[in-house]
Image (cartoon, rainbow, N blue to C red):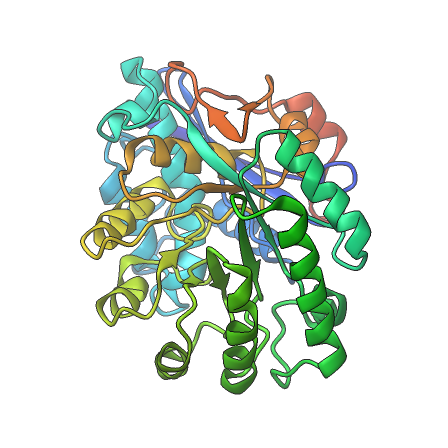
Amino acid sequence: MKITDLRIYLTRPEGSLSSWLFVEVDTDEGITGVGEATNAGGGGALIVGRTYELLKNDLEGYDFSEGLLGTDPANIDAIWHRIYRRFGTLGSRGFGTTIASGIDTALWDIKGKALGRPVWDLLGGKIRNSVPLYTAVGPLNDIDACVANAKRLVSLGYEALGLDPFDREMRRQHRRYIDGTISAEGAAYAEDLMSALREAVGPDIELMIDAHGNFDVSTATDLCNRMSKFDLTWFEEPLQPESLDAHRQLRRNTDINLCIGERKYTRWDFAPYLQEGLVNYIKPDVCWTGGISEMKRIAILAETYYVPITPHDASGAFNLIAGAHLLMNVPNIYRLEMSESGLESYNAVITEPLDIRDGHMHLTDKPGLGYDLDHDYIAAHPDPEWARLHA
């Protein structure tokens, strides 16, 4: 079997401010695999899409420029390493791994379809029959409305809810670290919101905070300690991801469970945090870390430290689907992140709806990933800049 084509789709579902990037890999045996490499922020999806166009063929005379066309899709690891090393001088962790992610996931889909088995089976078989989920709760600028939504989500079967209670003030610099502080009023509002949520949902529903890396060490330490009374499962990304020393300092000064990972990309990035006991949970993104292959390697690494993995999902349907296949097989899991409010958008881009019941995602025995893109919907909802560039 040989790869014959690579097709890229950037779509902006109705009601979404960001676009999702899907890739299809065709073969000479008529089998097509689907992957996702959505990258949010600053036109990242456009950059990844244009790079995929570059990946199709060799660039004659350039080193490390091997293309994908004509290669055997069964050699998943070899293709992963080829892509990862090709962009080493640009920074393979982040850029190169995102490029690898969409291809890698599509190759697993192809292998599953060729063998007539679901991807979770190829990864080693299922450890569980369904994948537990957690979902975001909001709106974050209205405590009463947020509490009402939390009660609705619990009634649907969700047992874990995540949110950024600092969002009302910090949204303007979402993941854009400036001075690392929050006002006394903003911190007090976050406490009021978390207090109201905990009272409303009771002690048995798990709550997680995501701070999106907005704080300096001093502020993060204060907020982690102030939030510990709400019995959180974790406090996610209190700091920006670059400084290992900053995370060491935070770990020394708070006992709350810490979670990082959406901006860590490979086993090499996670290794020191696990080795030094700096985190209690990790959250790599299957669209950014290098696809299913690297997620499995990271999960195995984390298992040696008895640290659970929770795939980050802030993207499209195949982000969720690929993460679910992994969690069907991996023993050391917490839950799979999803957006219940985004369920309509997830289902719009695939040909049949996701099976979400009682706070769990259920996968079938269908070969590969078990889902296909809805090309009609995607064609009717293009990313506007991608459409302009390809007019």
Left or right relative to 276: residue 84: right
Residue 382, relative to residue 43: is it above or below?
Answer: above
- From where the camera sits, is residue 168 visible? yes
In the image, 217 versus 301, the foreground residue is 217
Classify residue 283 by image quadrant: bottom left
In the image, 301 versus 79, the foreground residue is 301
Q: Position of residue 136 (x, y in %)?
A: 62, 47
Left or right relative to 296: residue 355: right
Q: State the quadrant of the N terminus.
A: top left
Residue lying at 41% horizontally and 47% vertically, measured from the top left: 310
Q: Position of residue 85 (x, y in %)?
A: 29, 58
Residue lying at 72% horizontally and 82% vertically, measured from the top left: 184
- Outermost residue toward the left in this view: 304
- From where the camera sits, is residue 69 visible? no
Q: Position of residue 19 (x, y in %)?
A: 67, 45
In the image, 181 versus 185, the foreground residue is 185
In the image, 251 versus 379, the foreground residue is 251
Residue lying at 58% horizontally and 66% vertically, measured from the top left: 211
Q: Position of residue 233 (x, y in %)?
A: 46, 55
Residue 182, relative to residue 289: is it above or below?
Answer: below
Left or right relative to 391: residue 10: left
Classify residue 317 by image quadrant: top right
Residue lying at 53% horizontally and 46% vertically, measured from the top left: 313
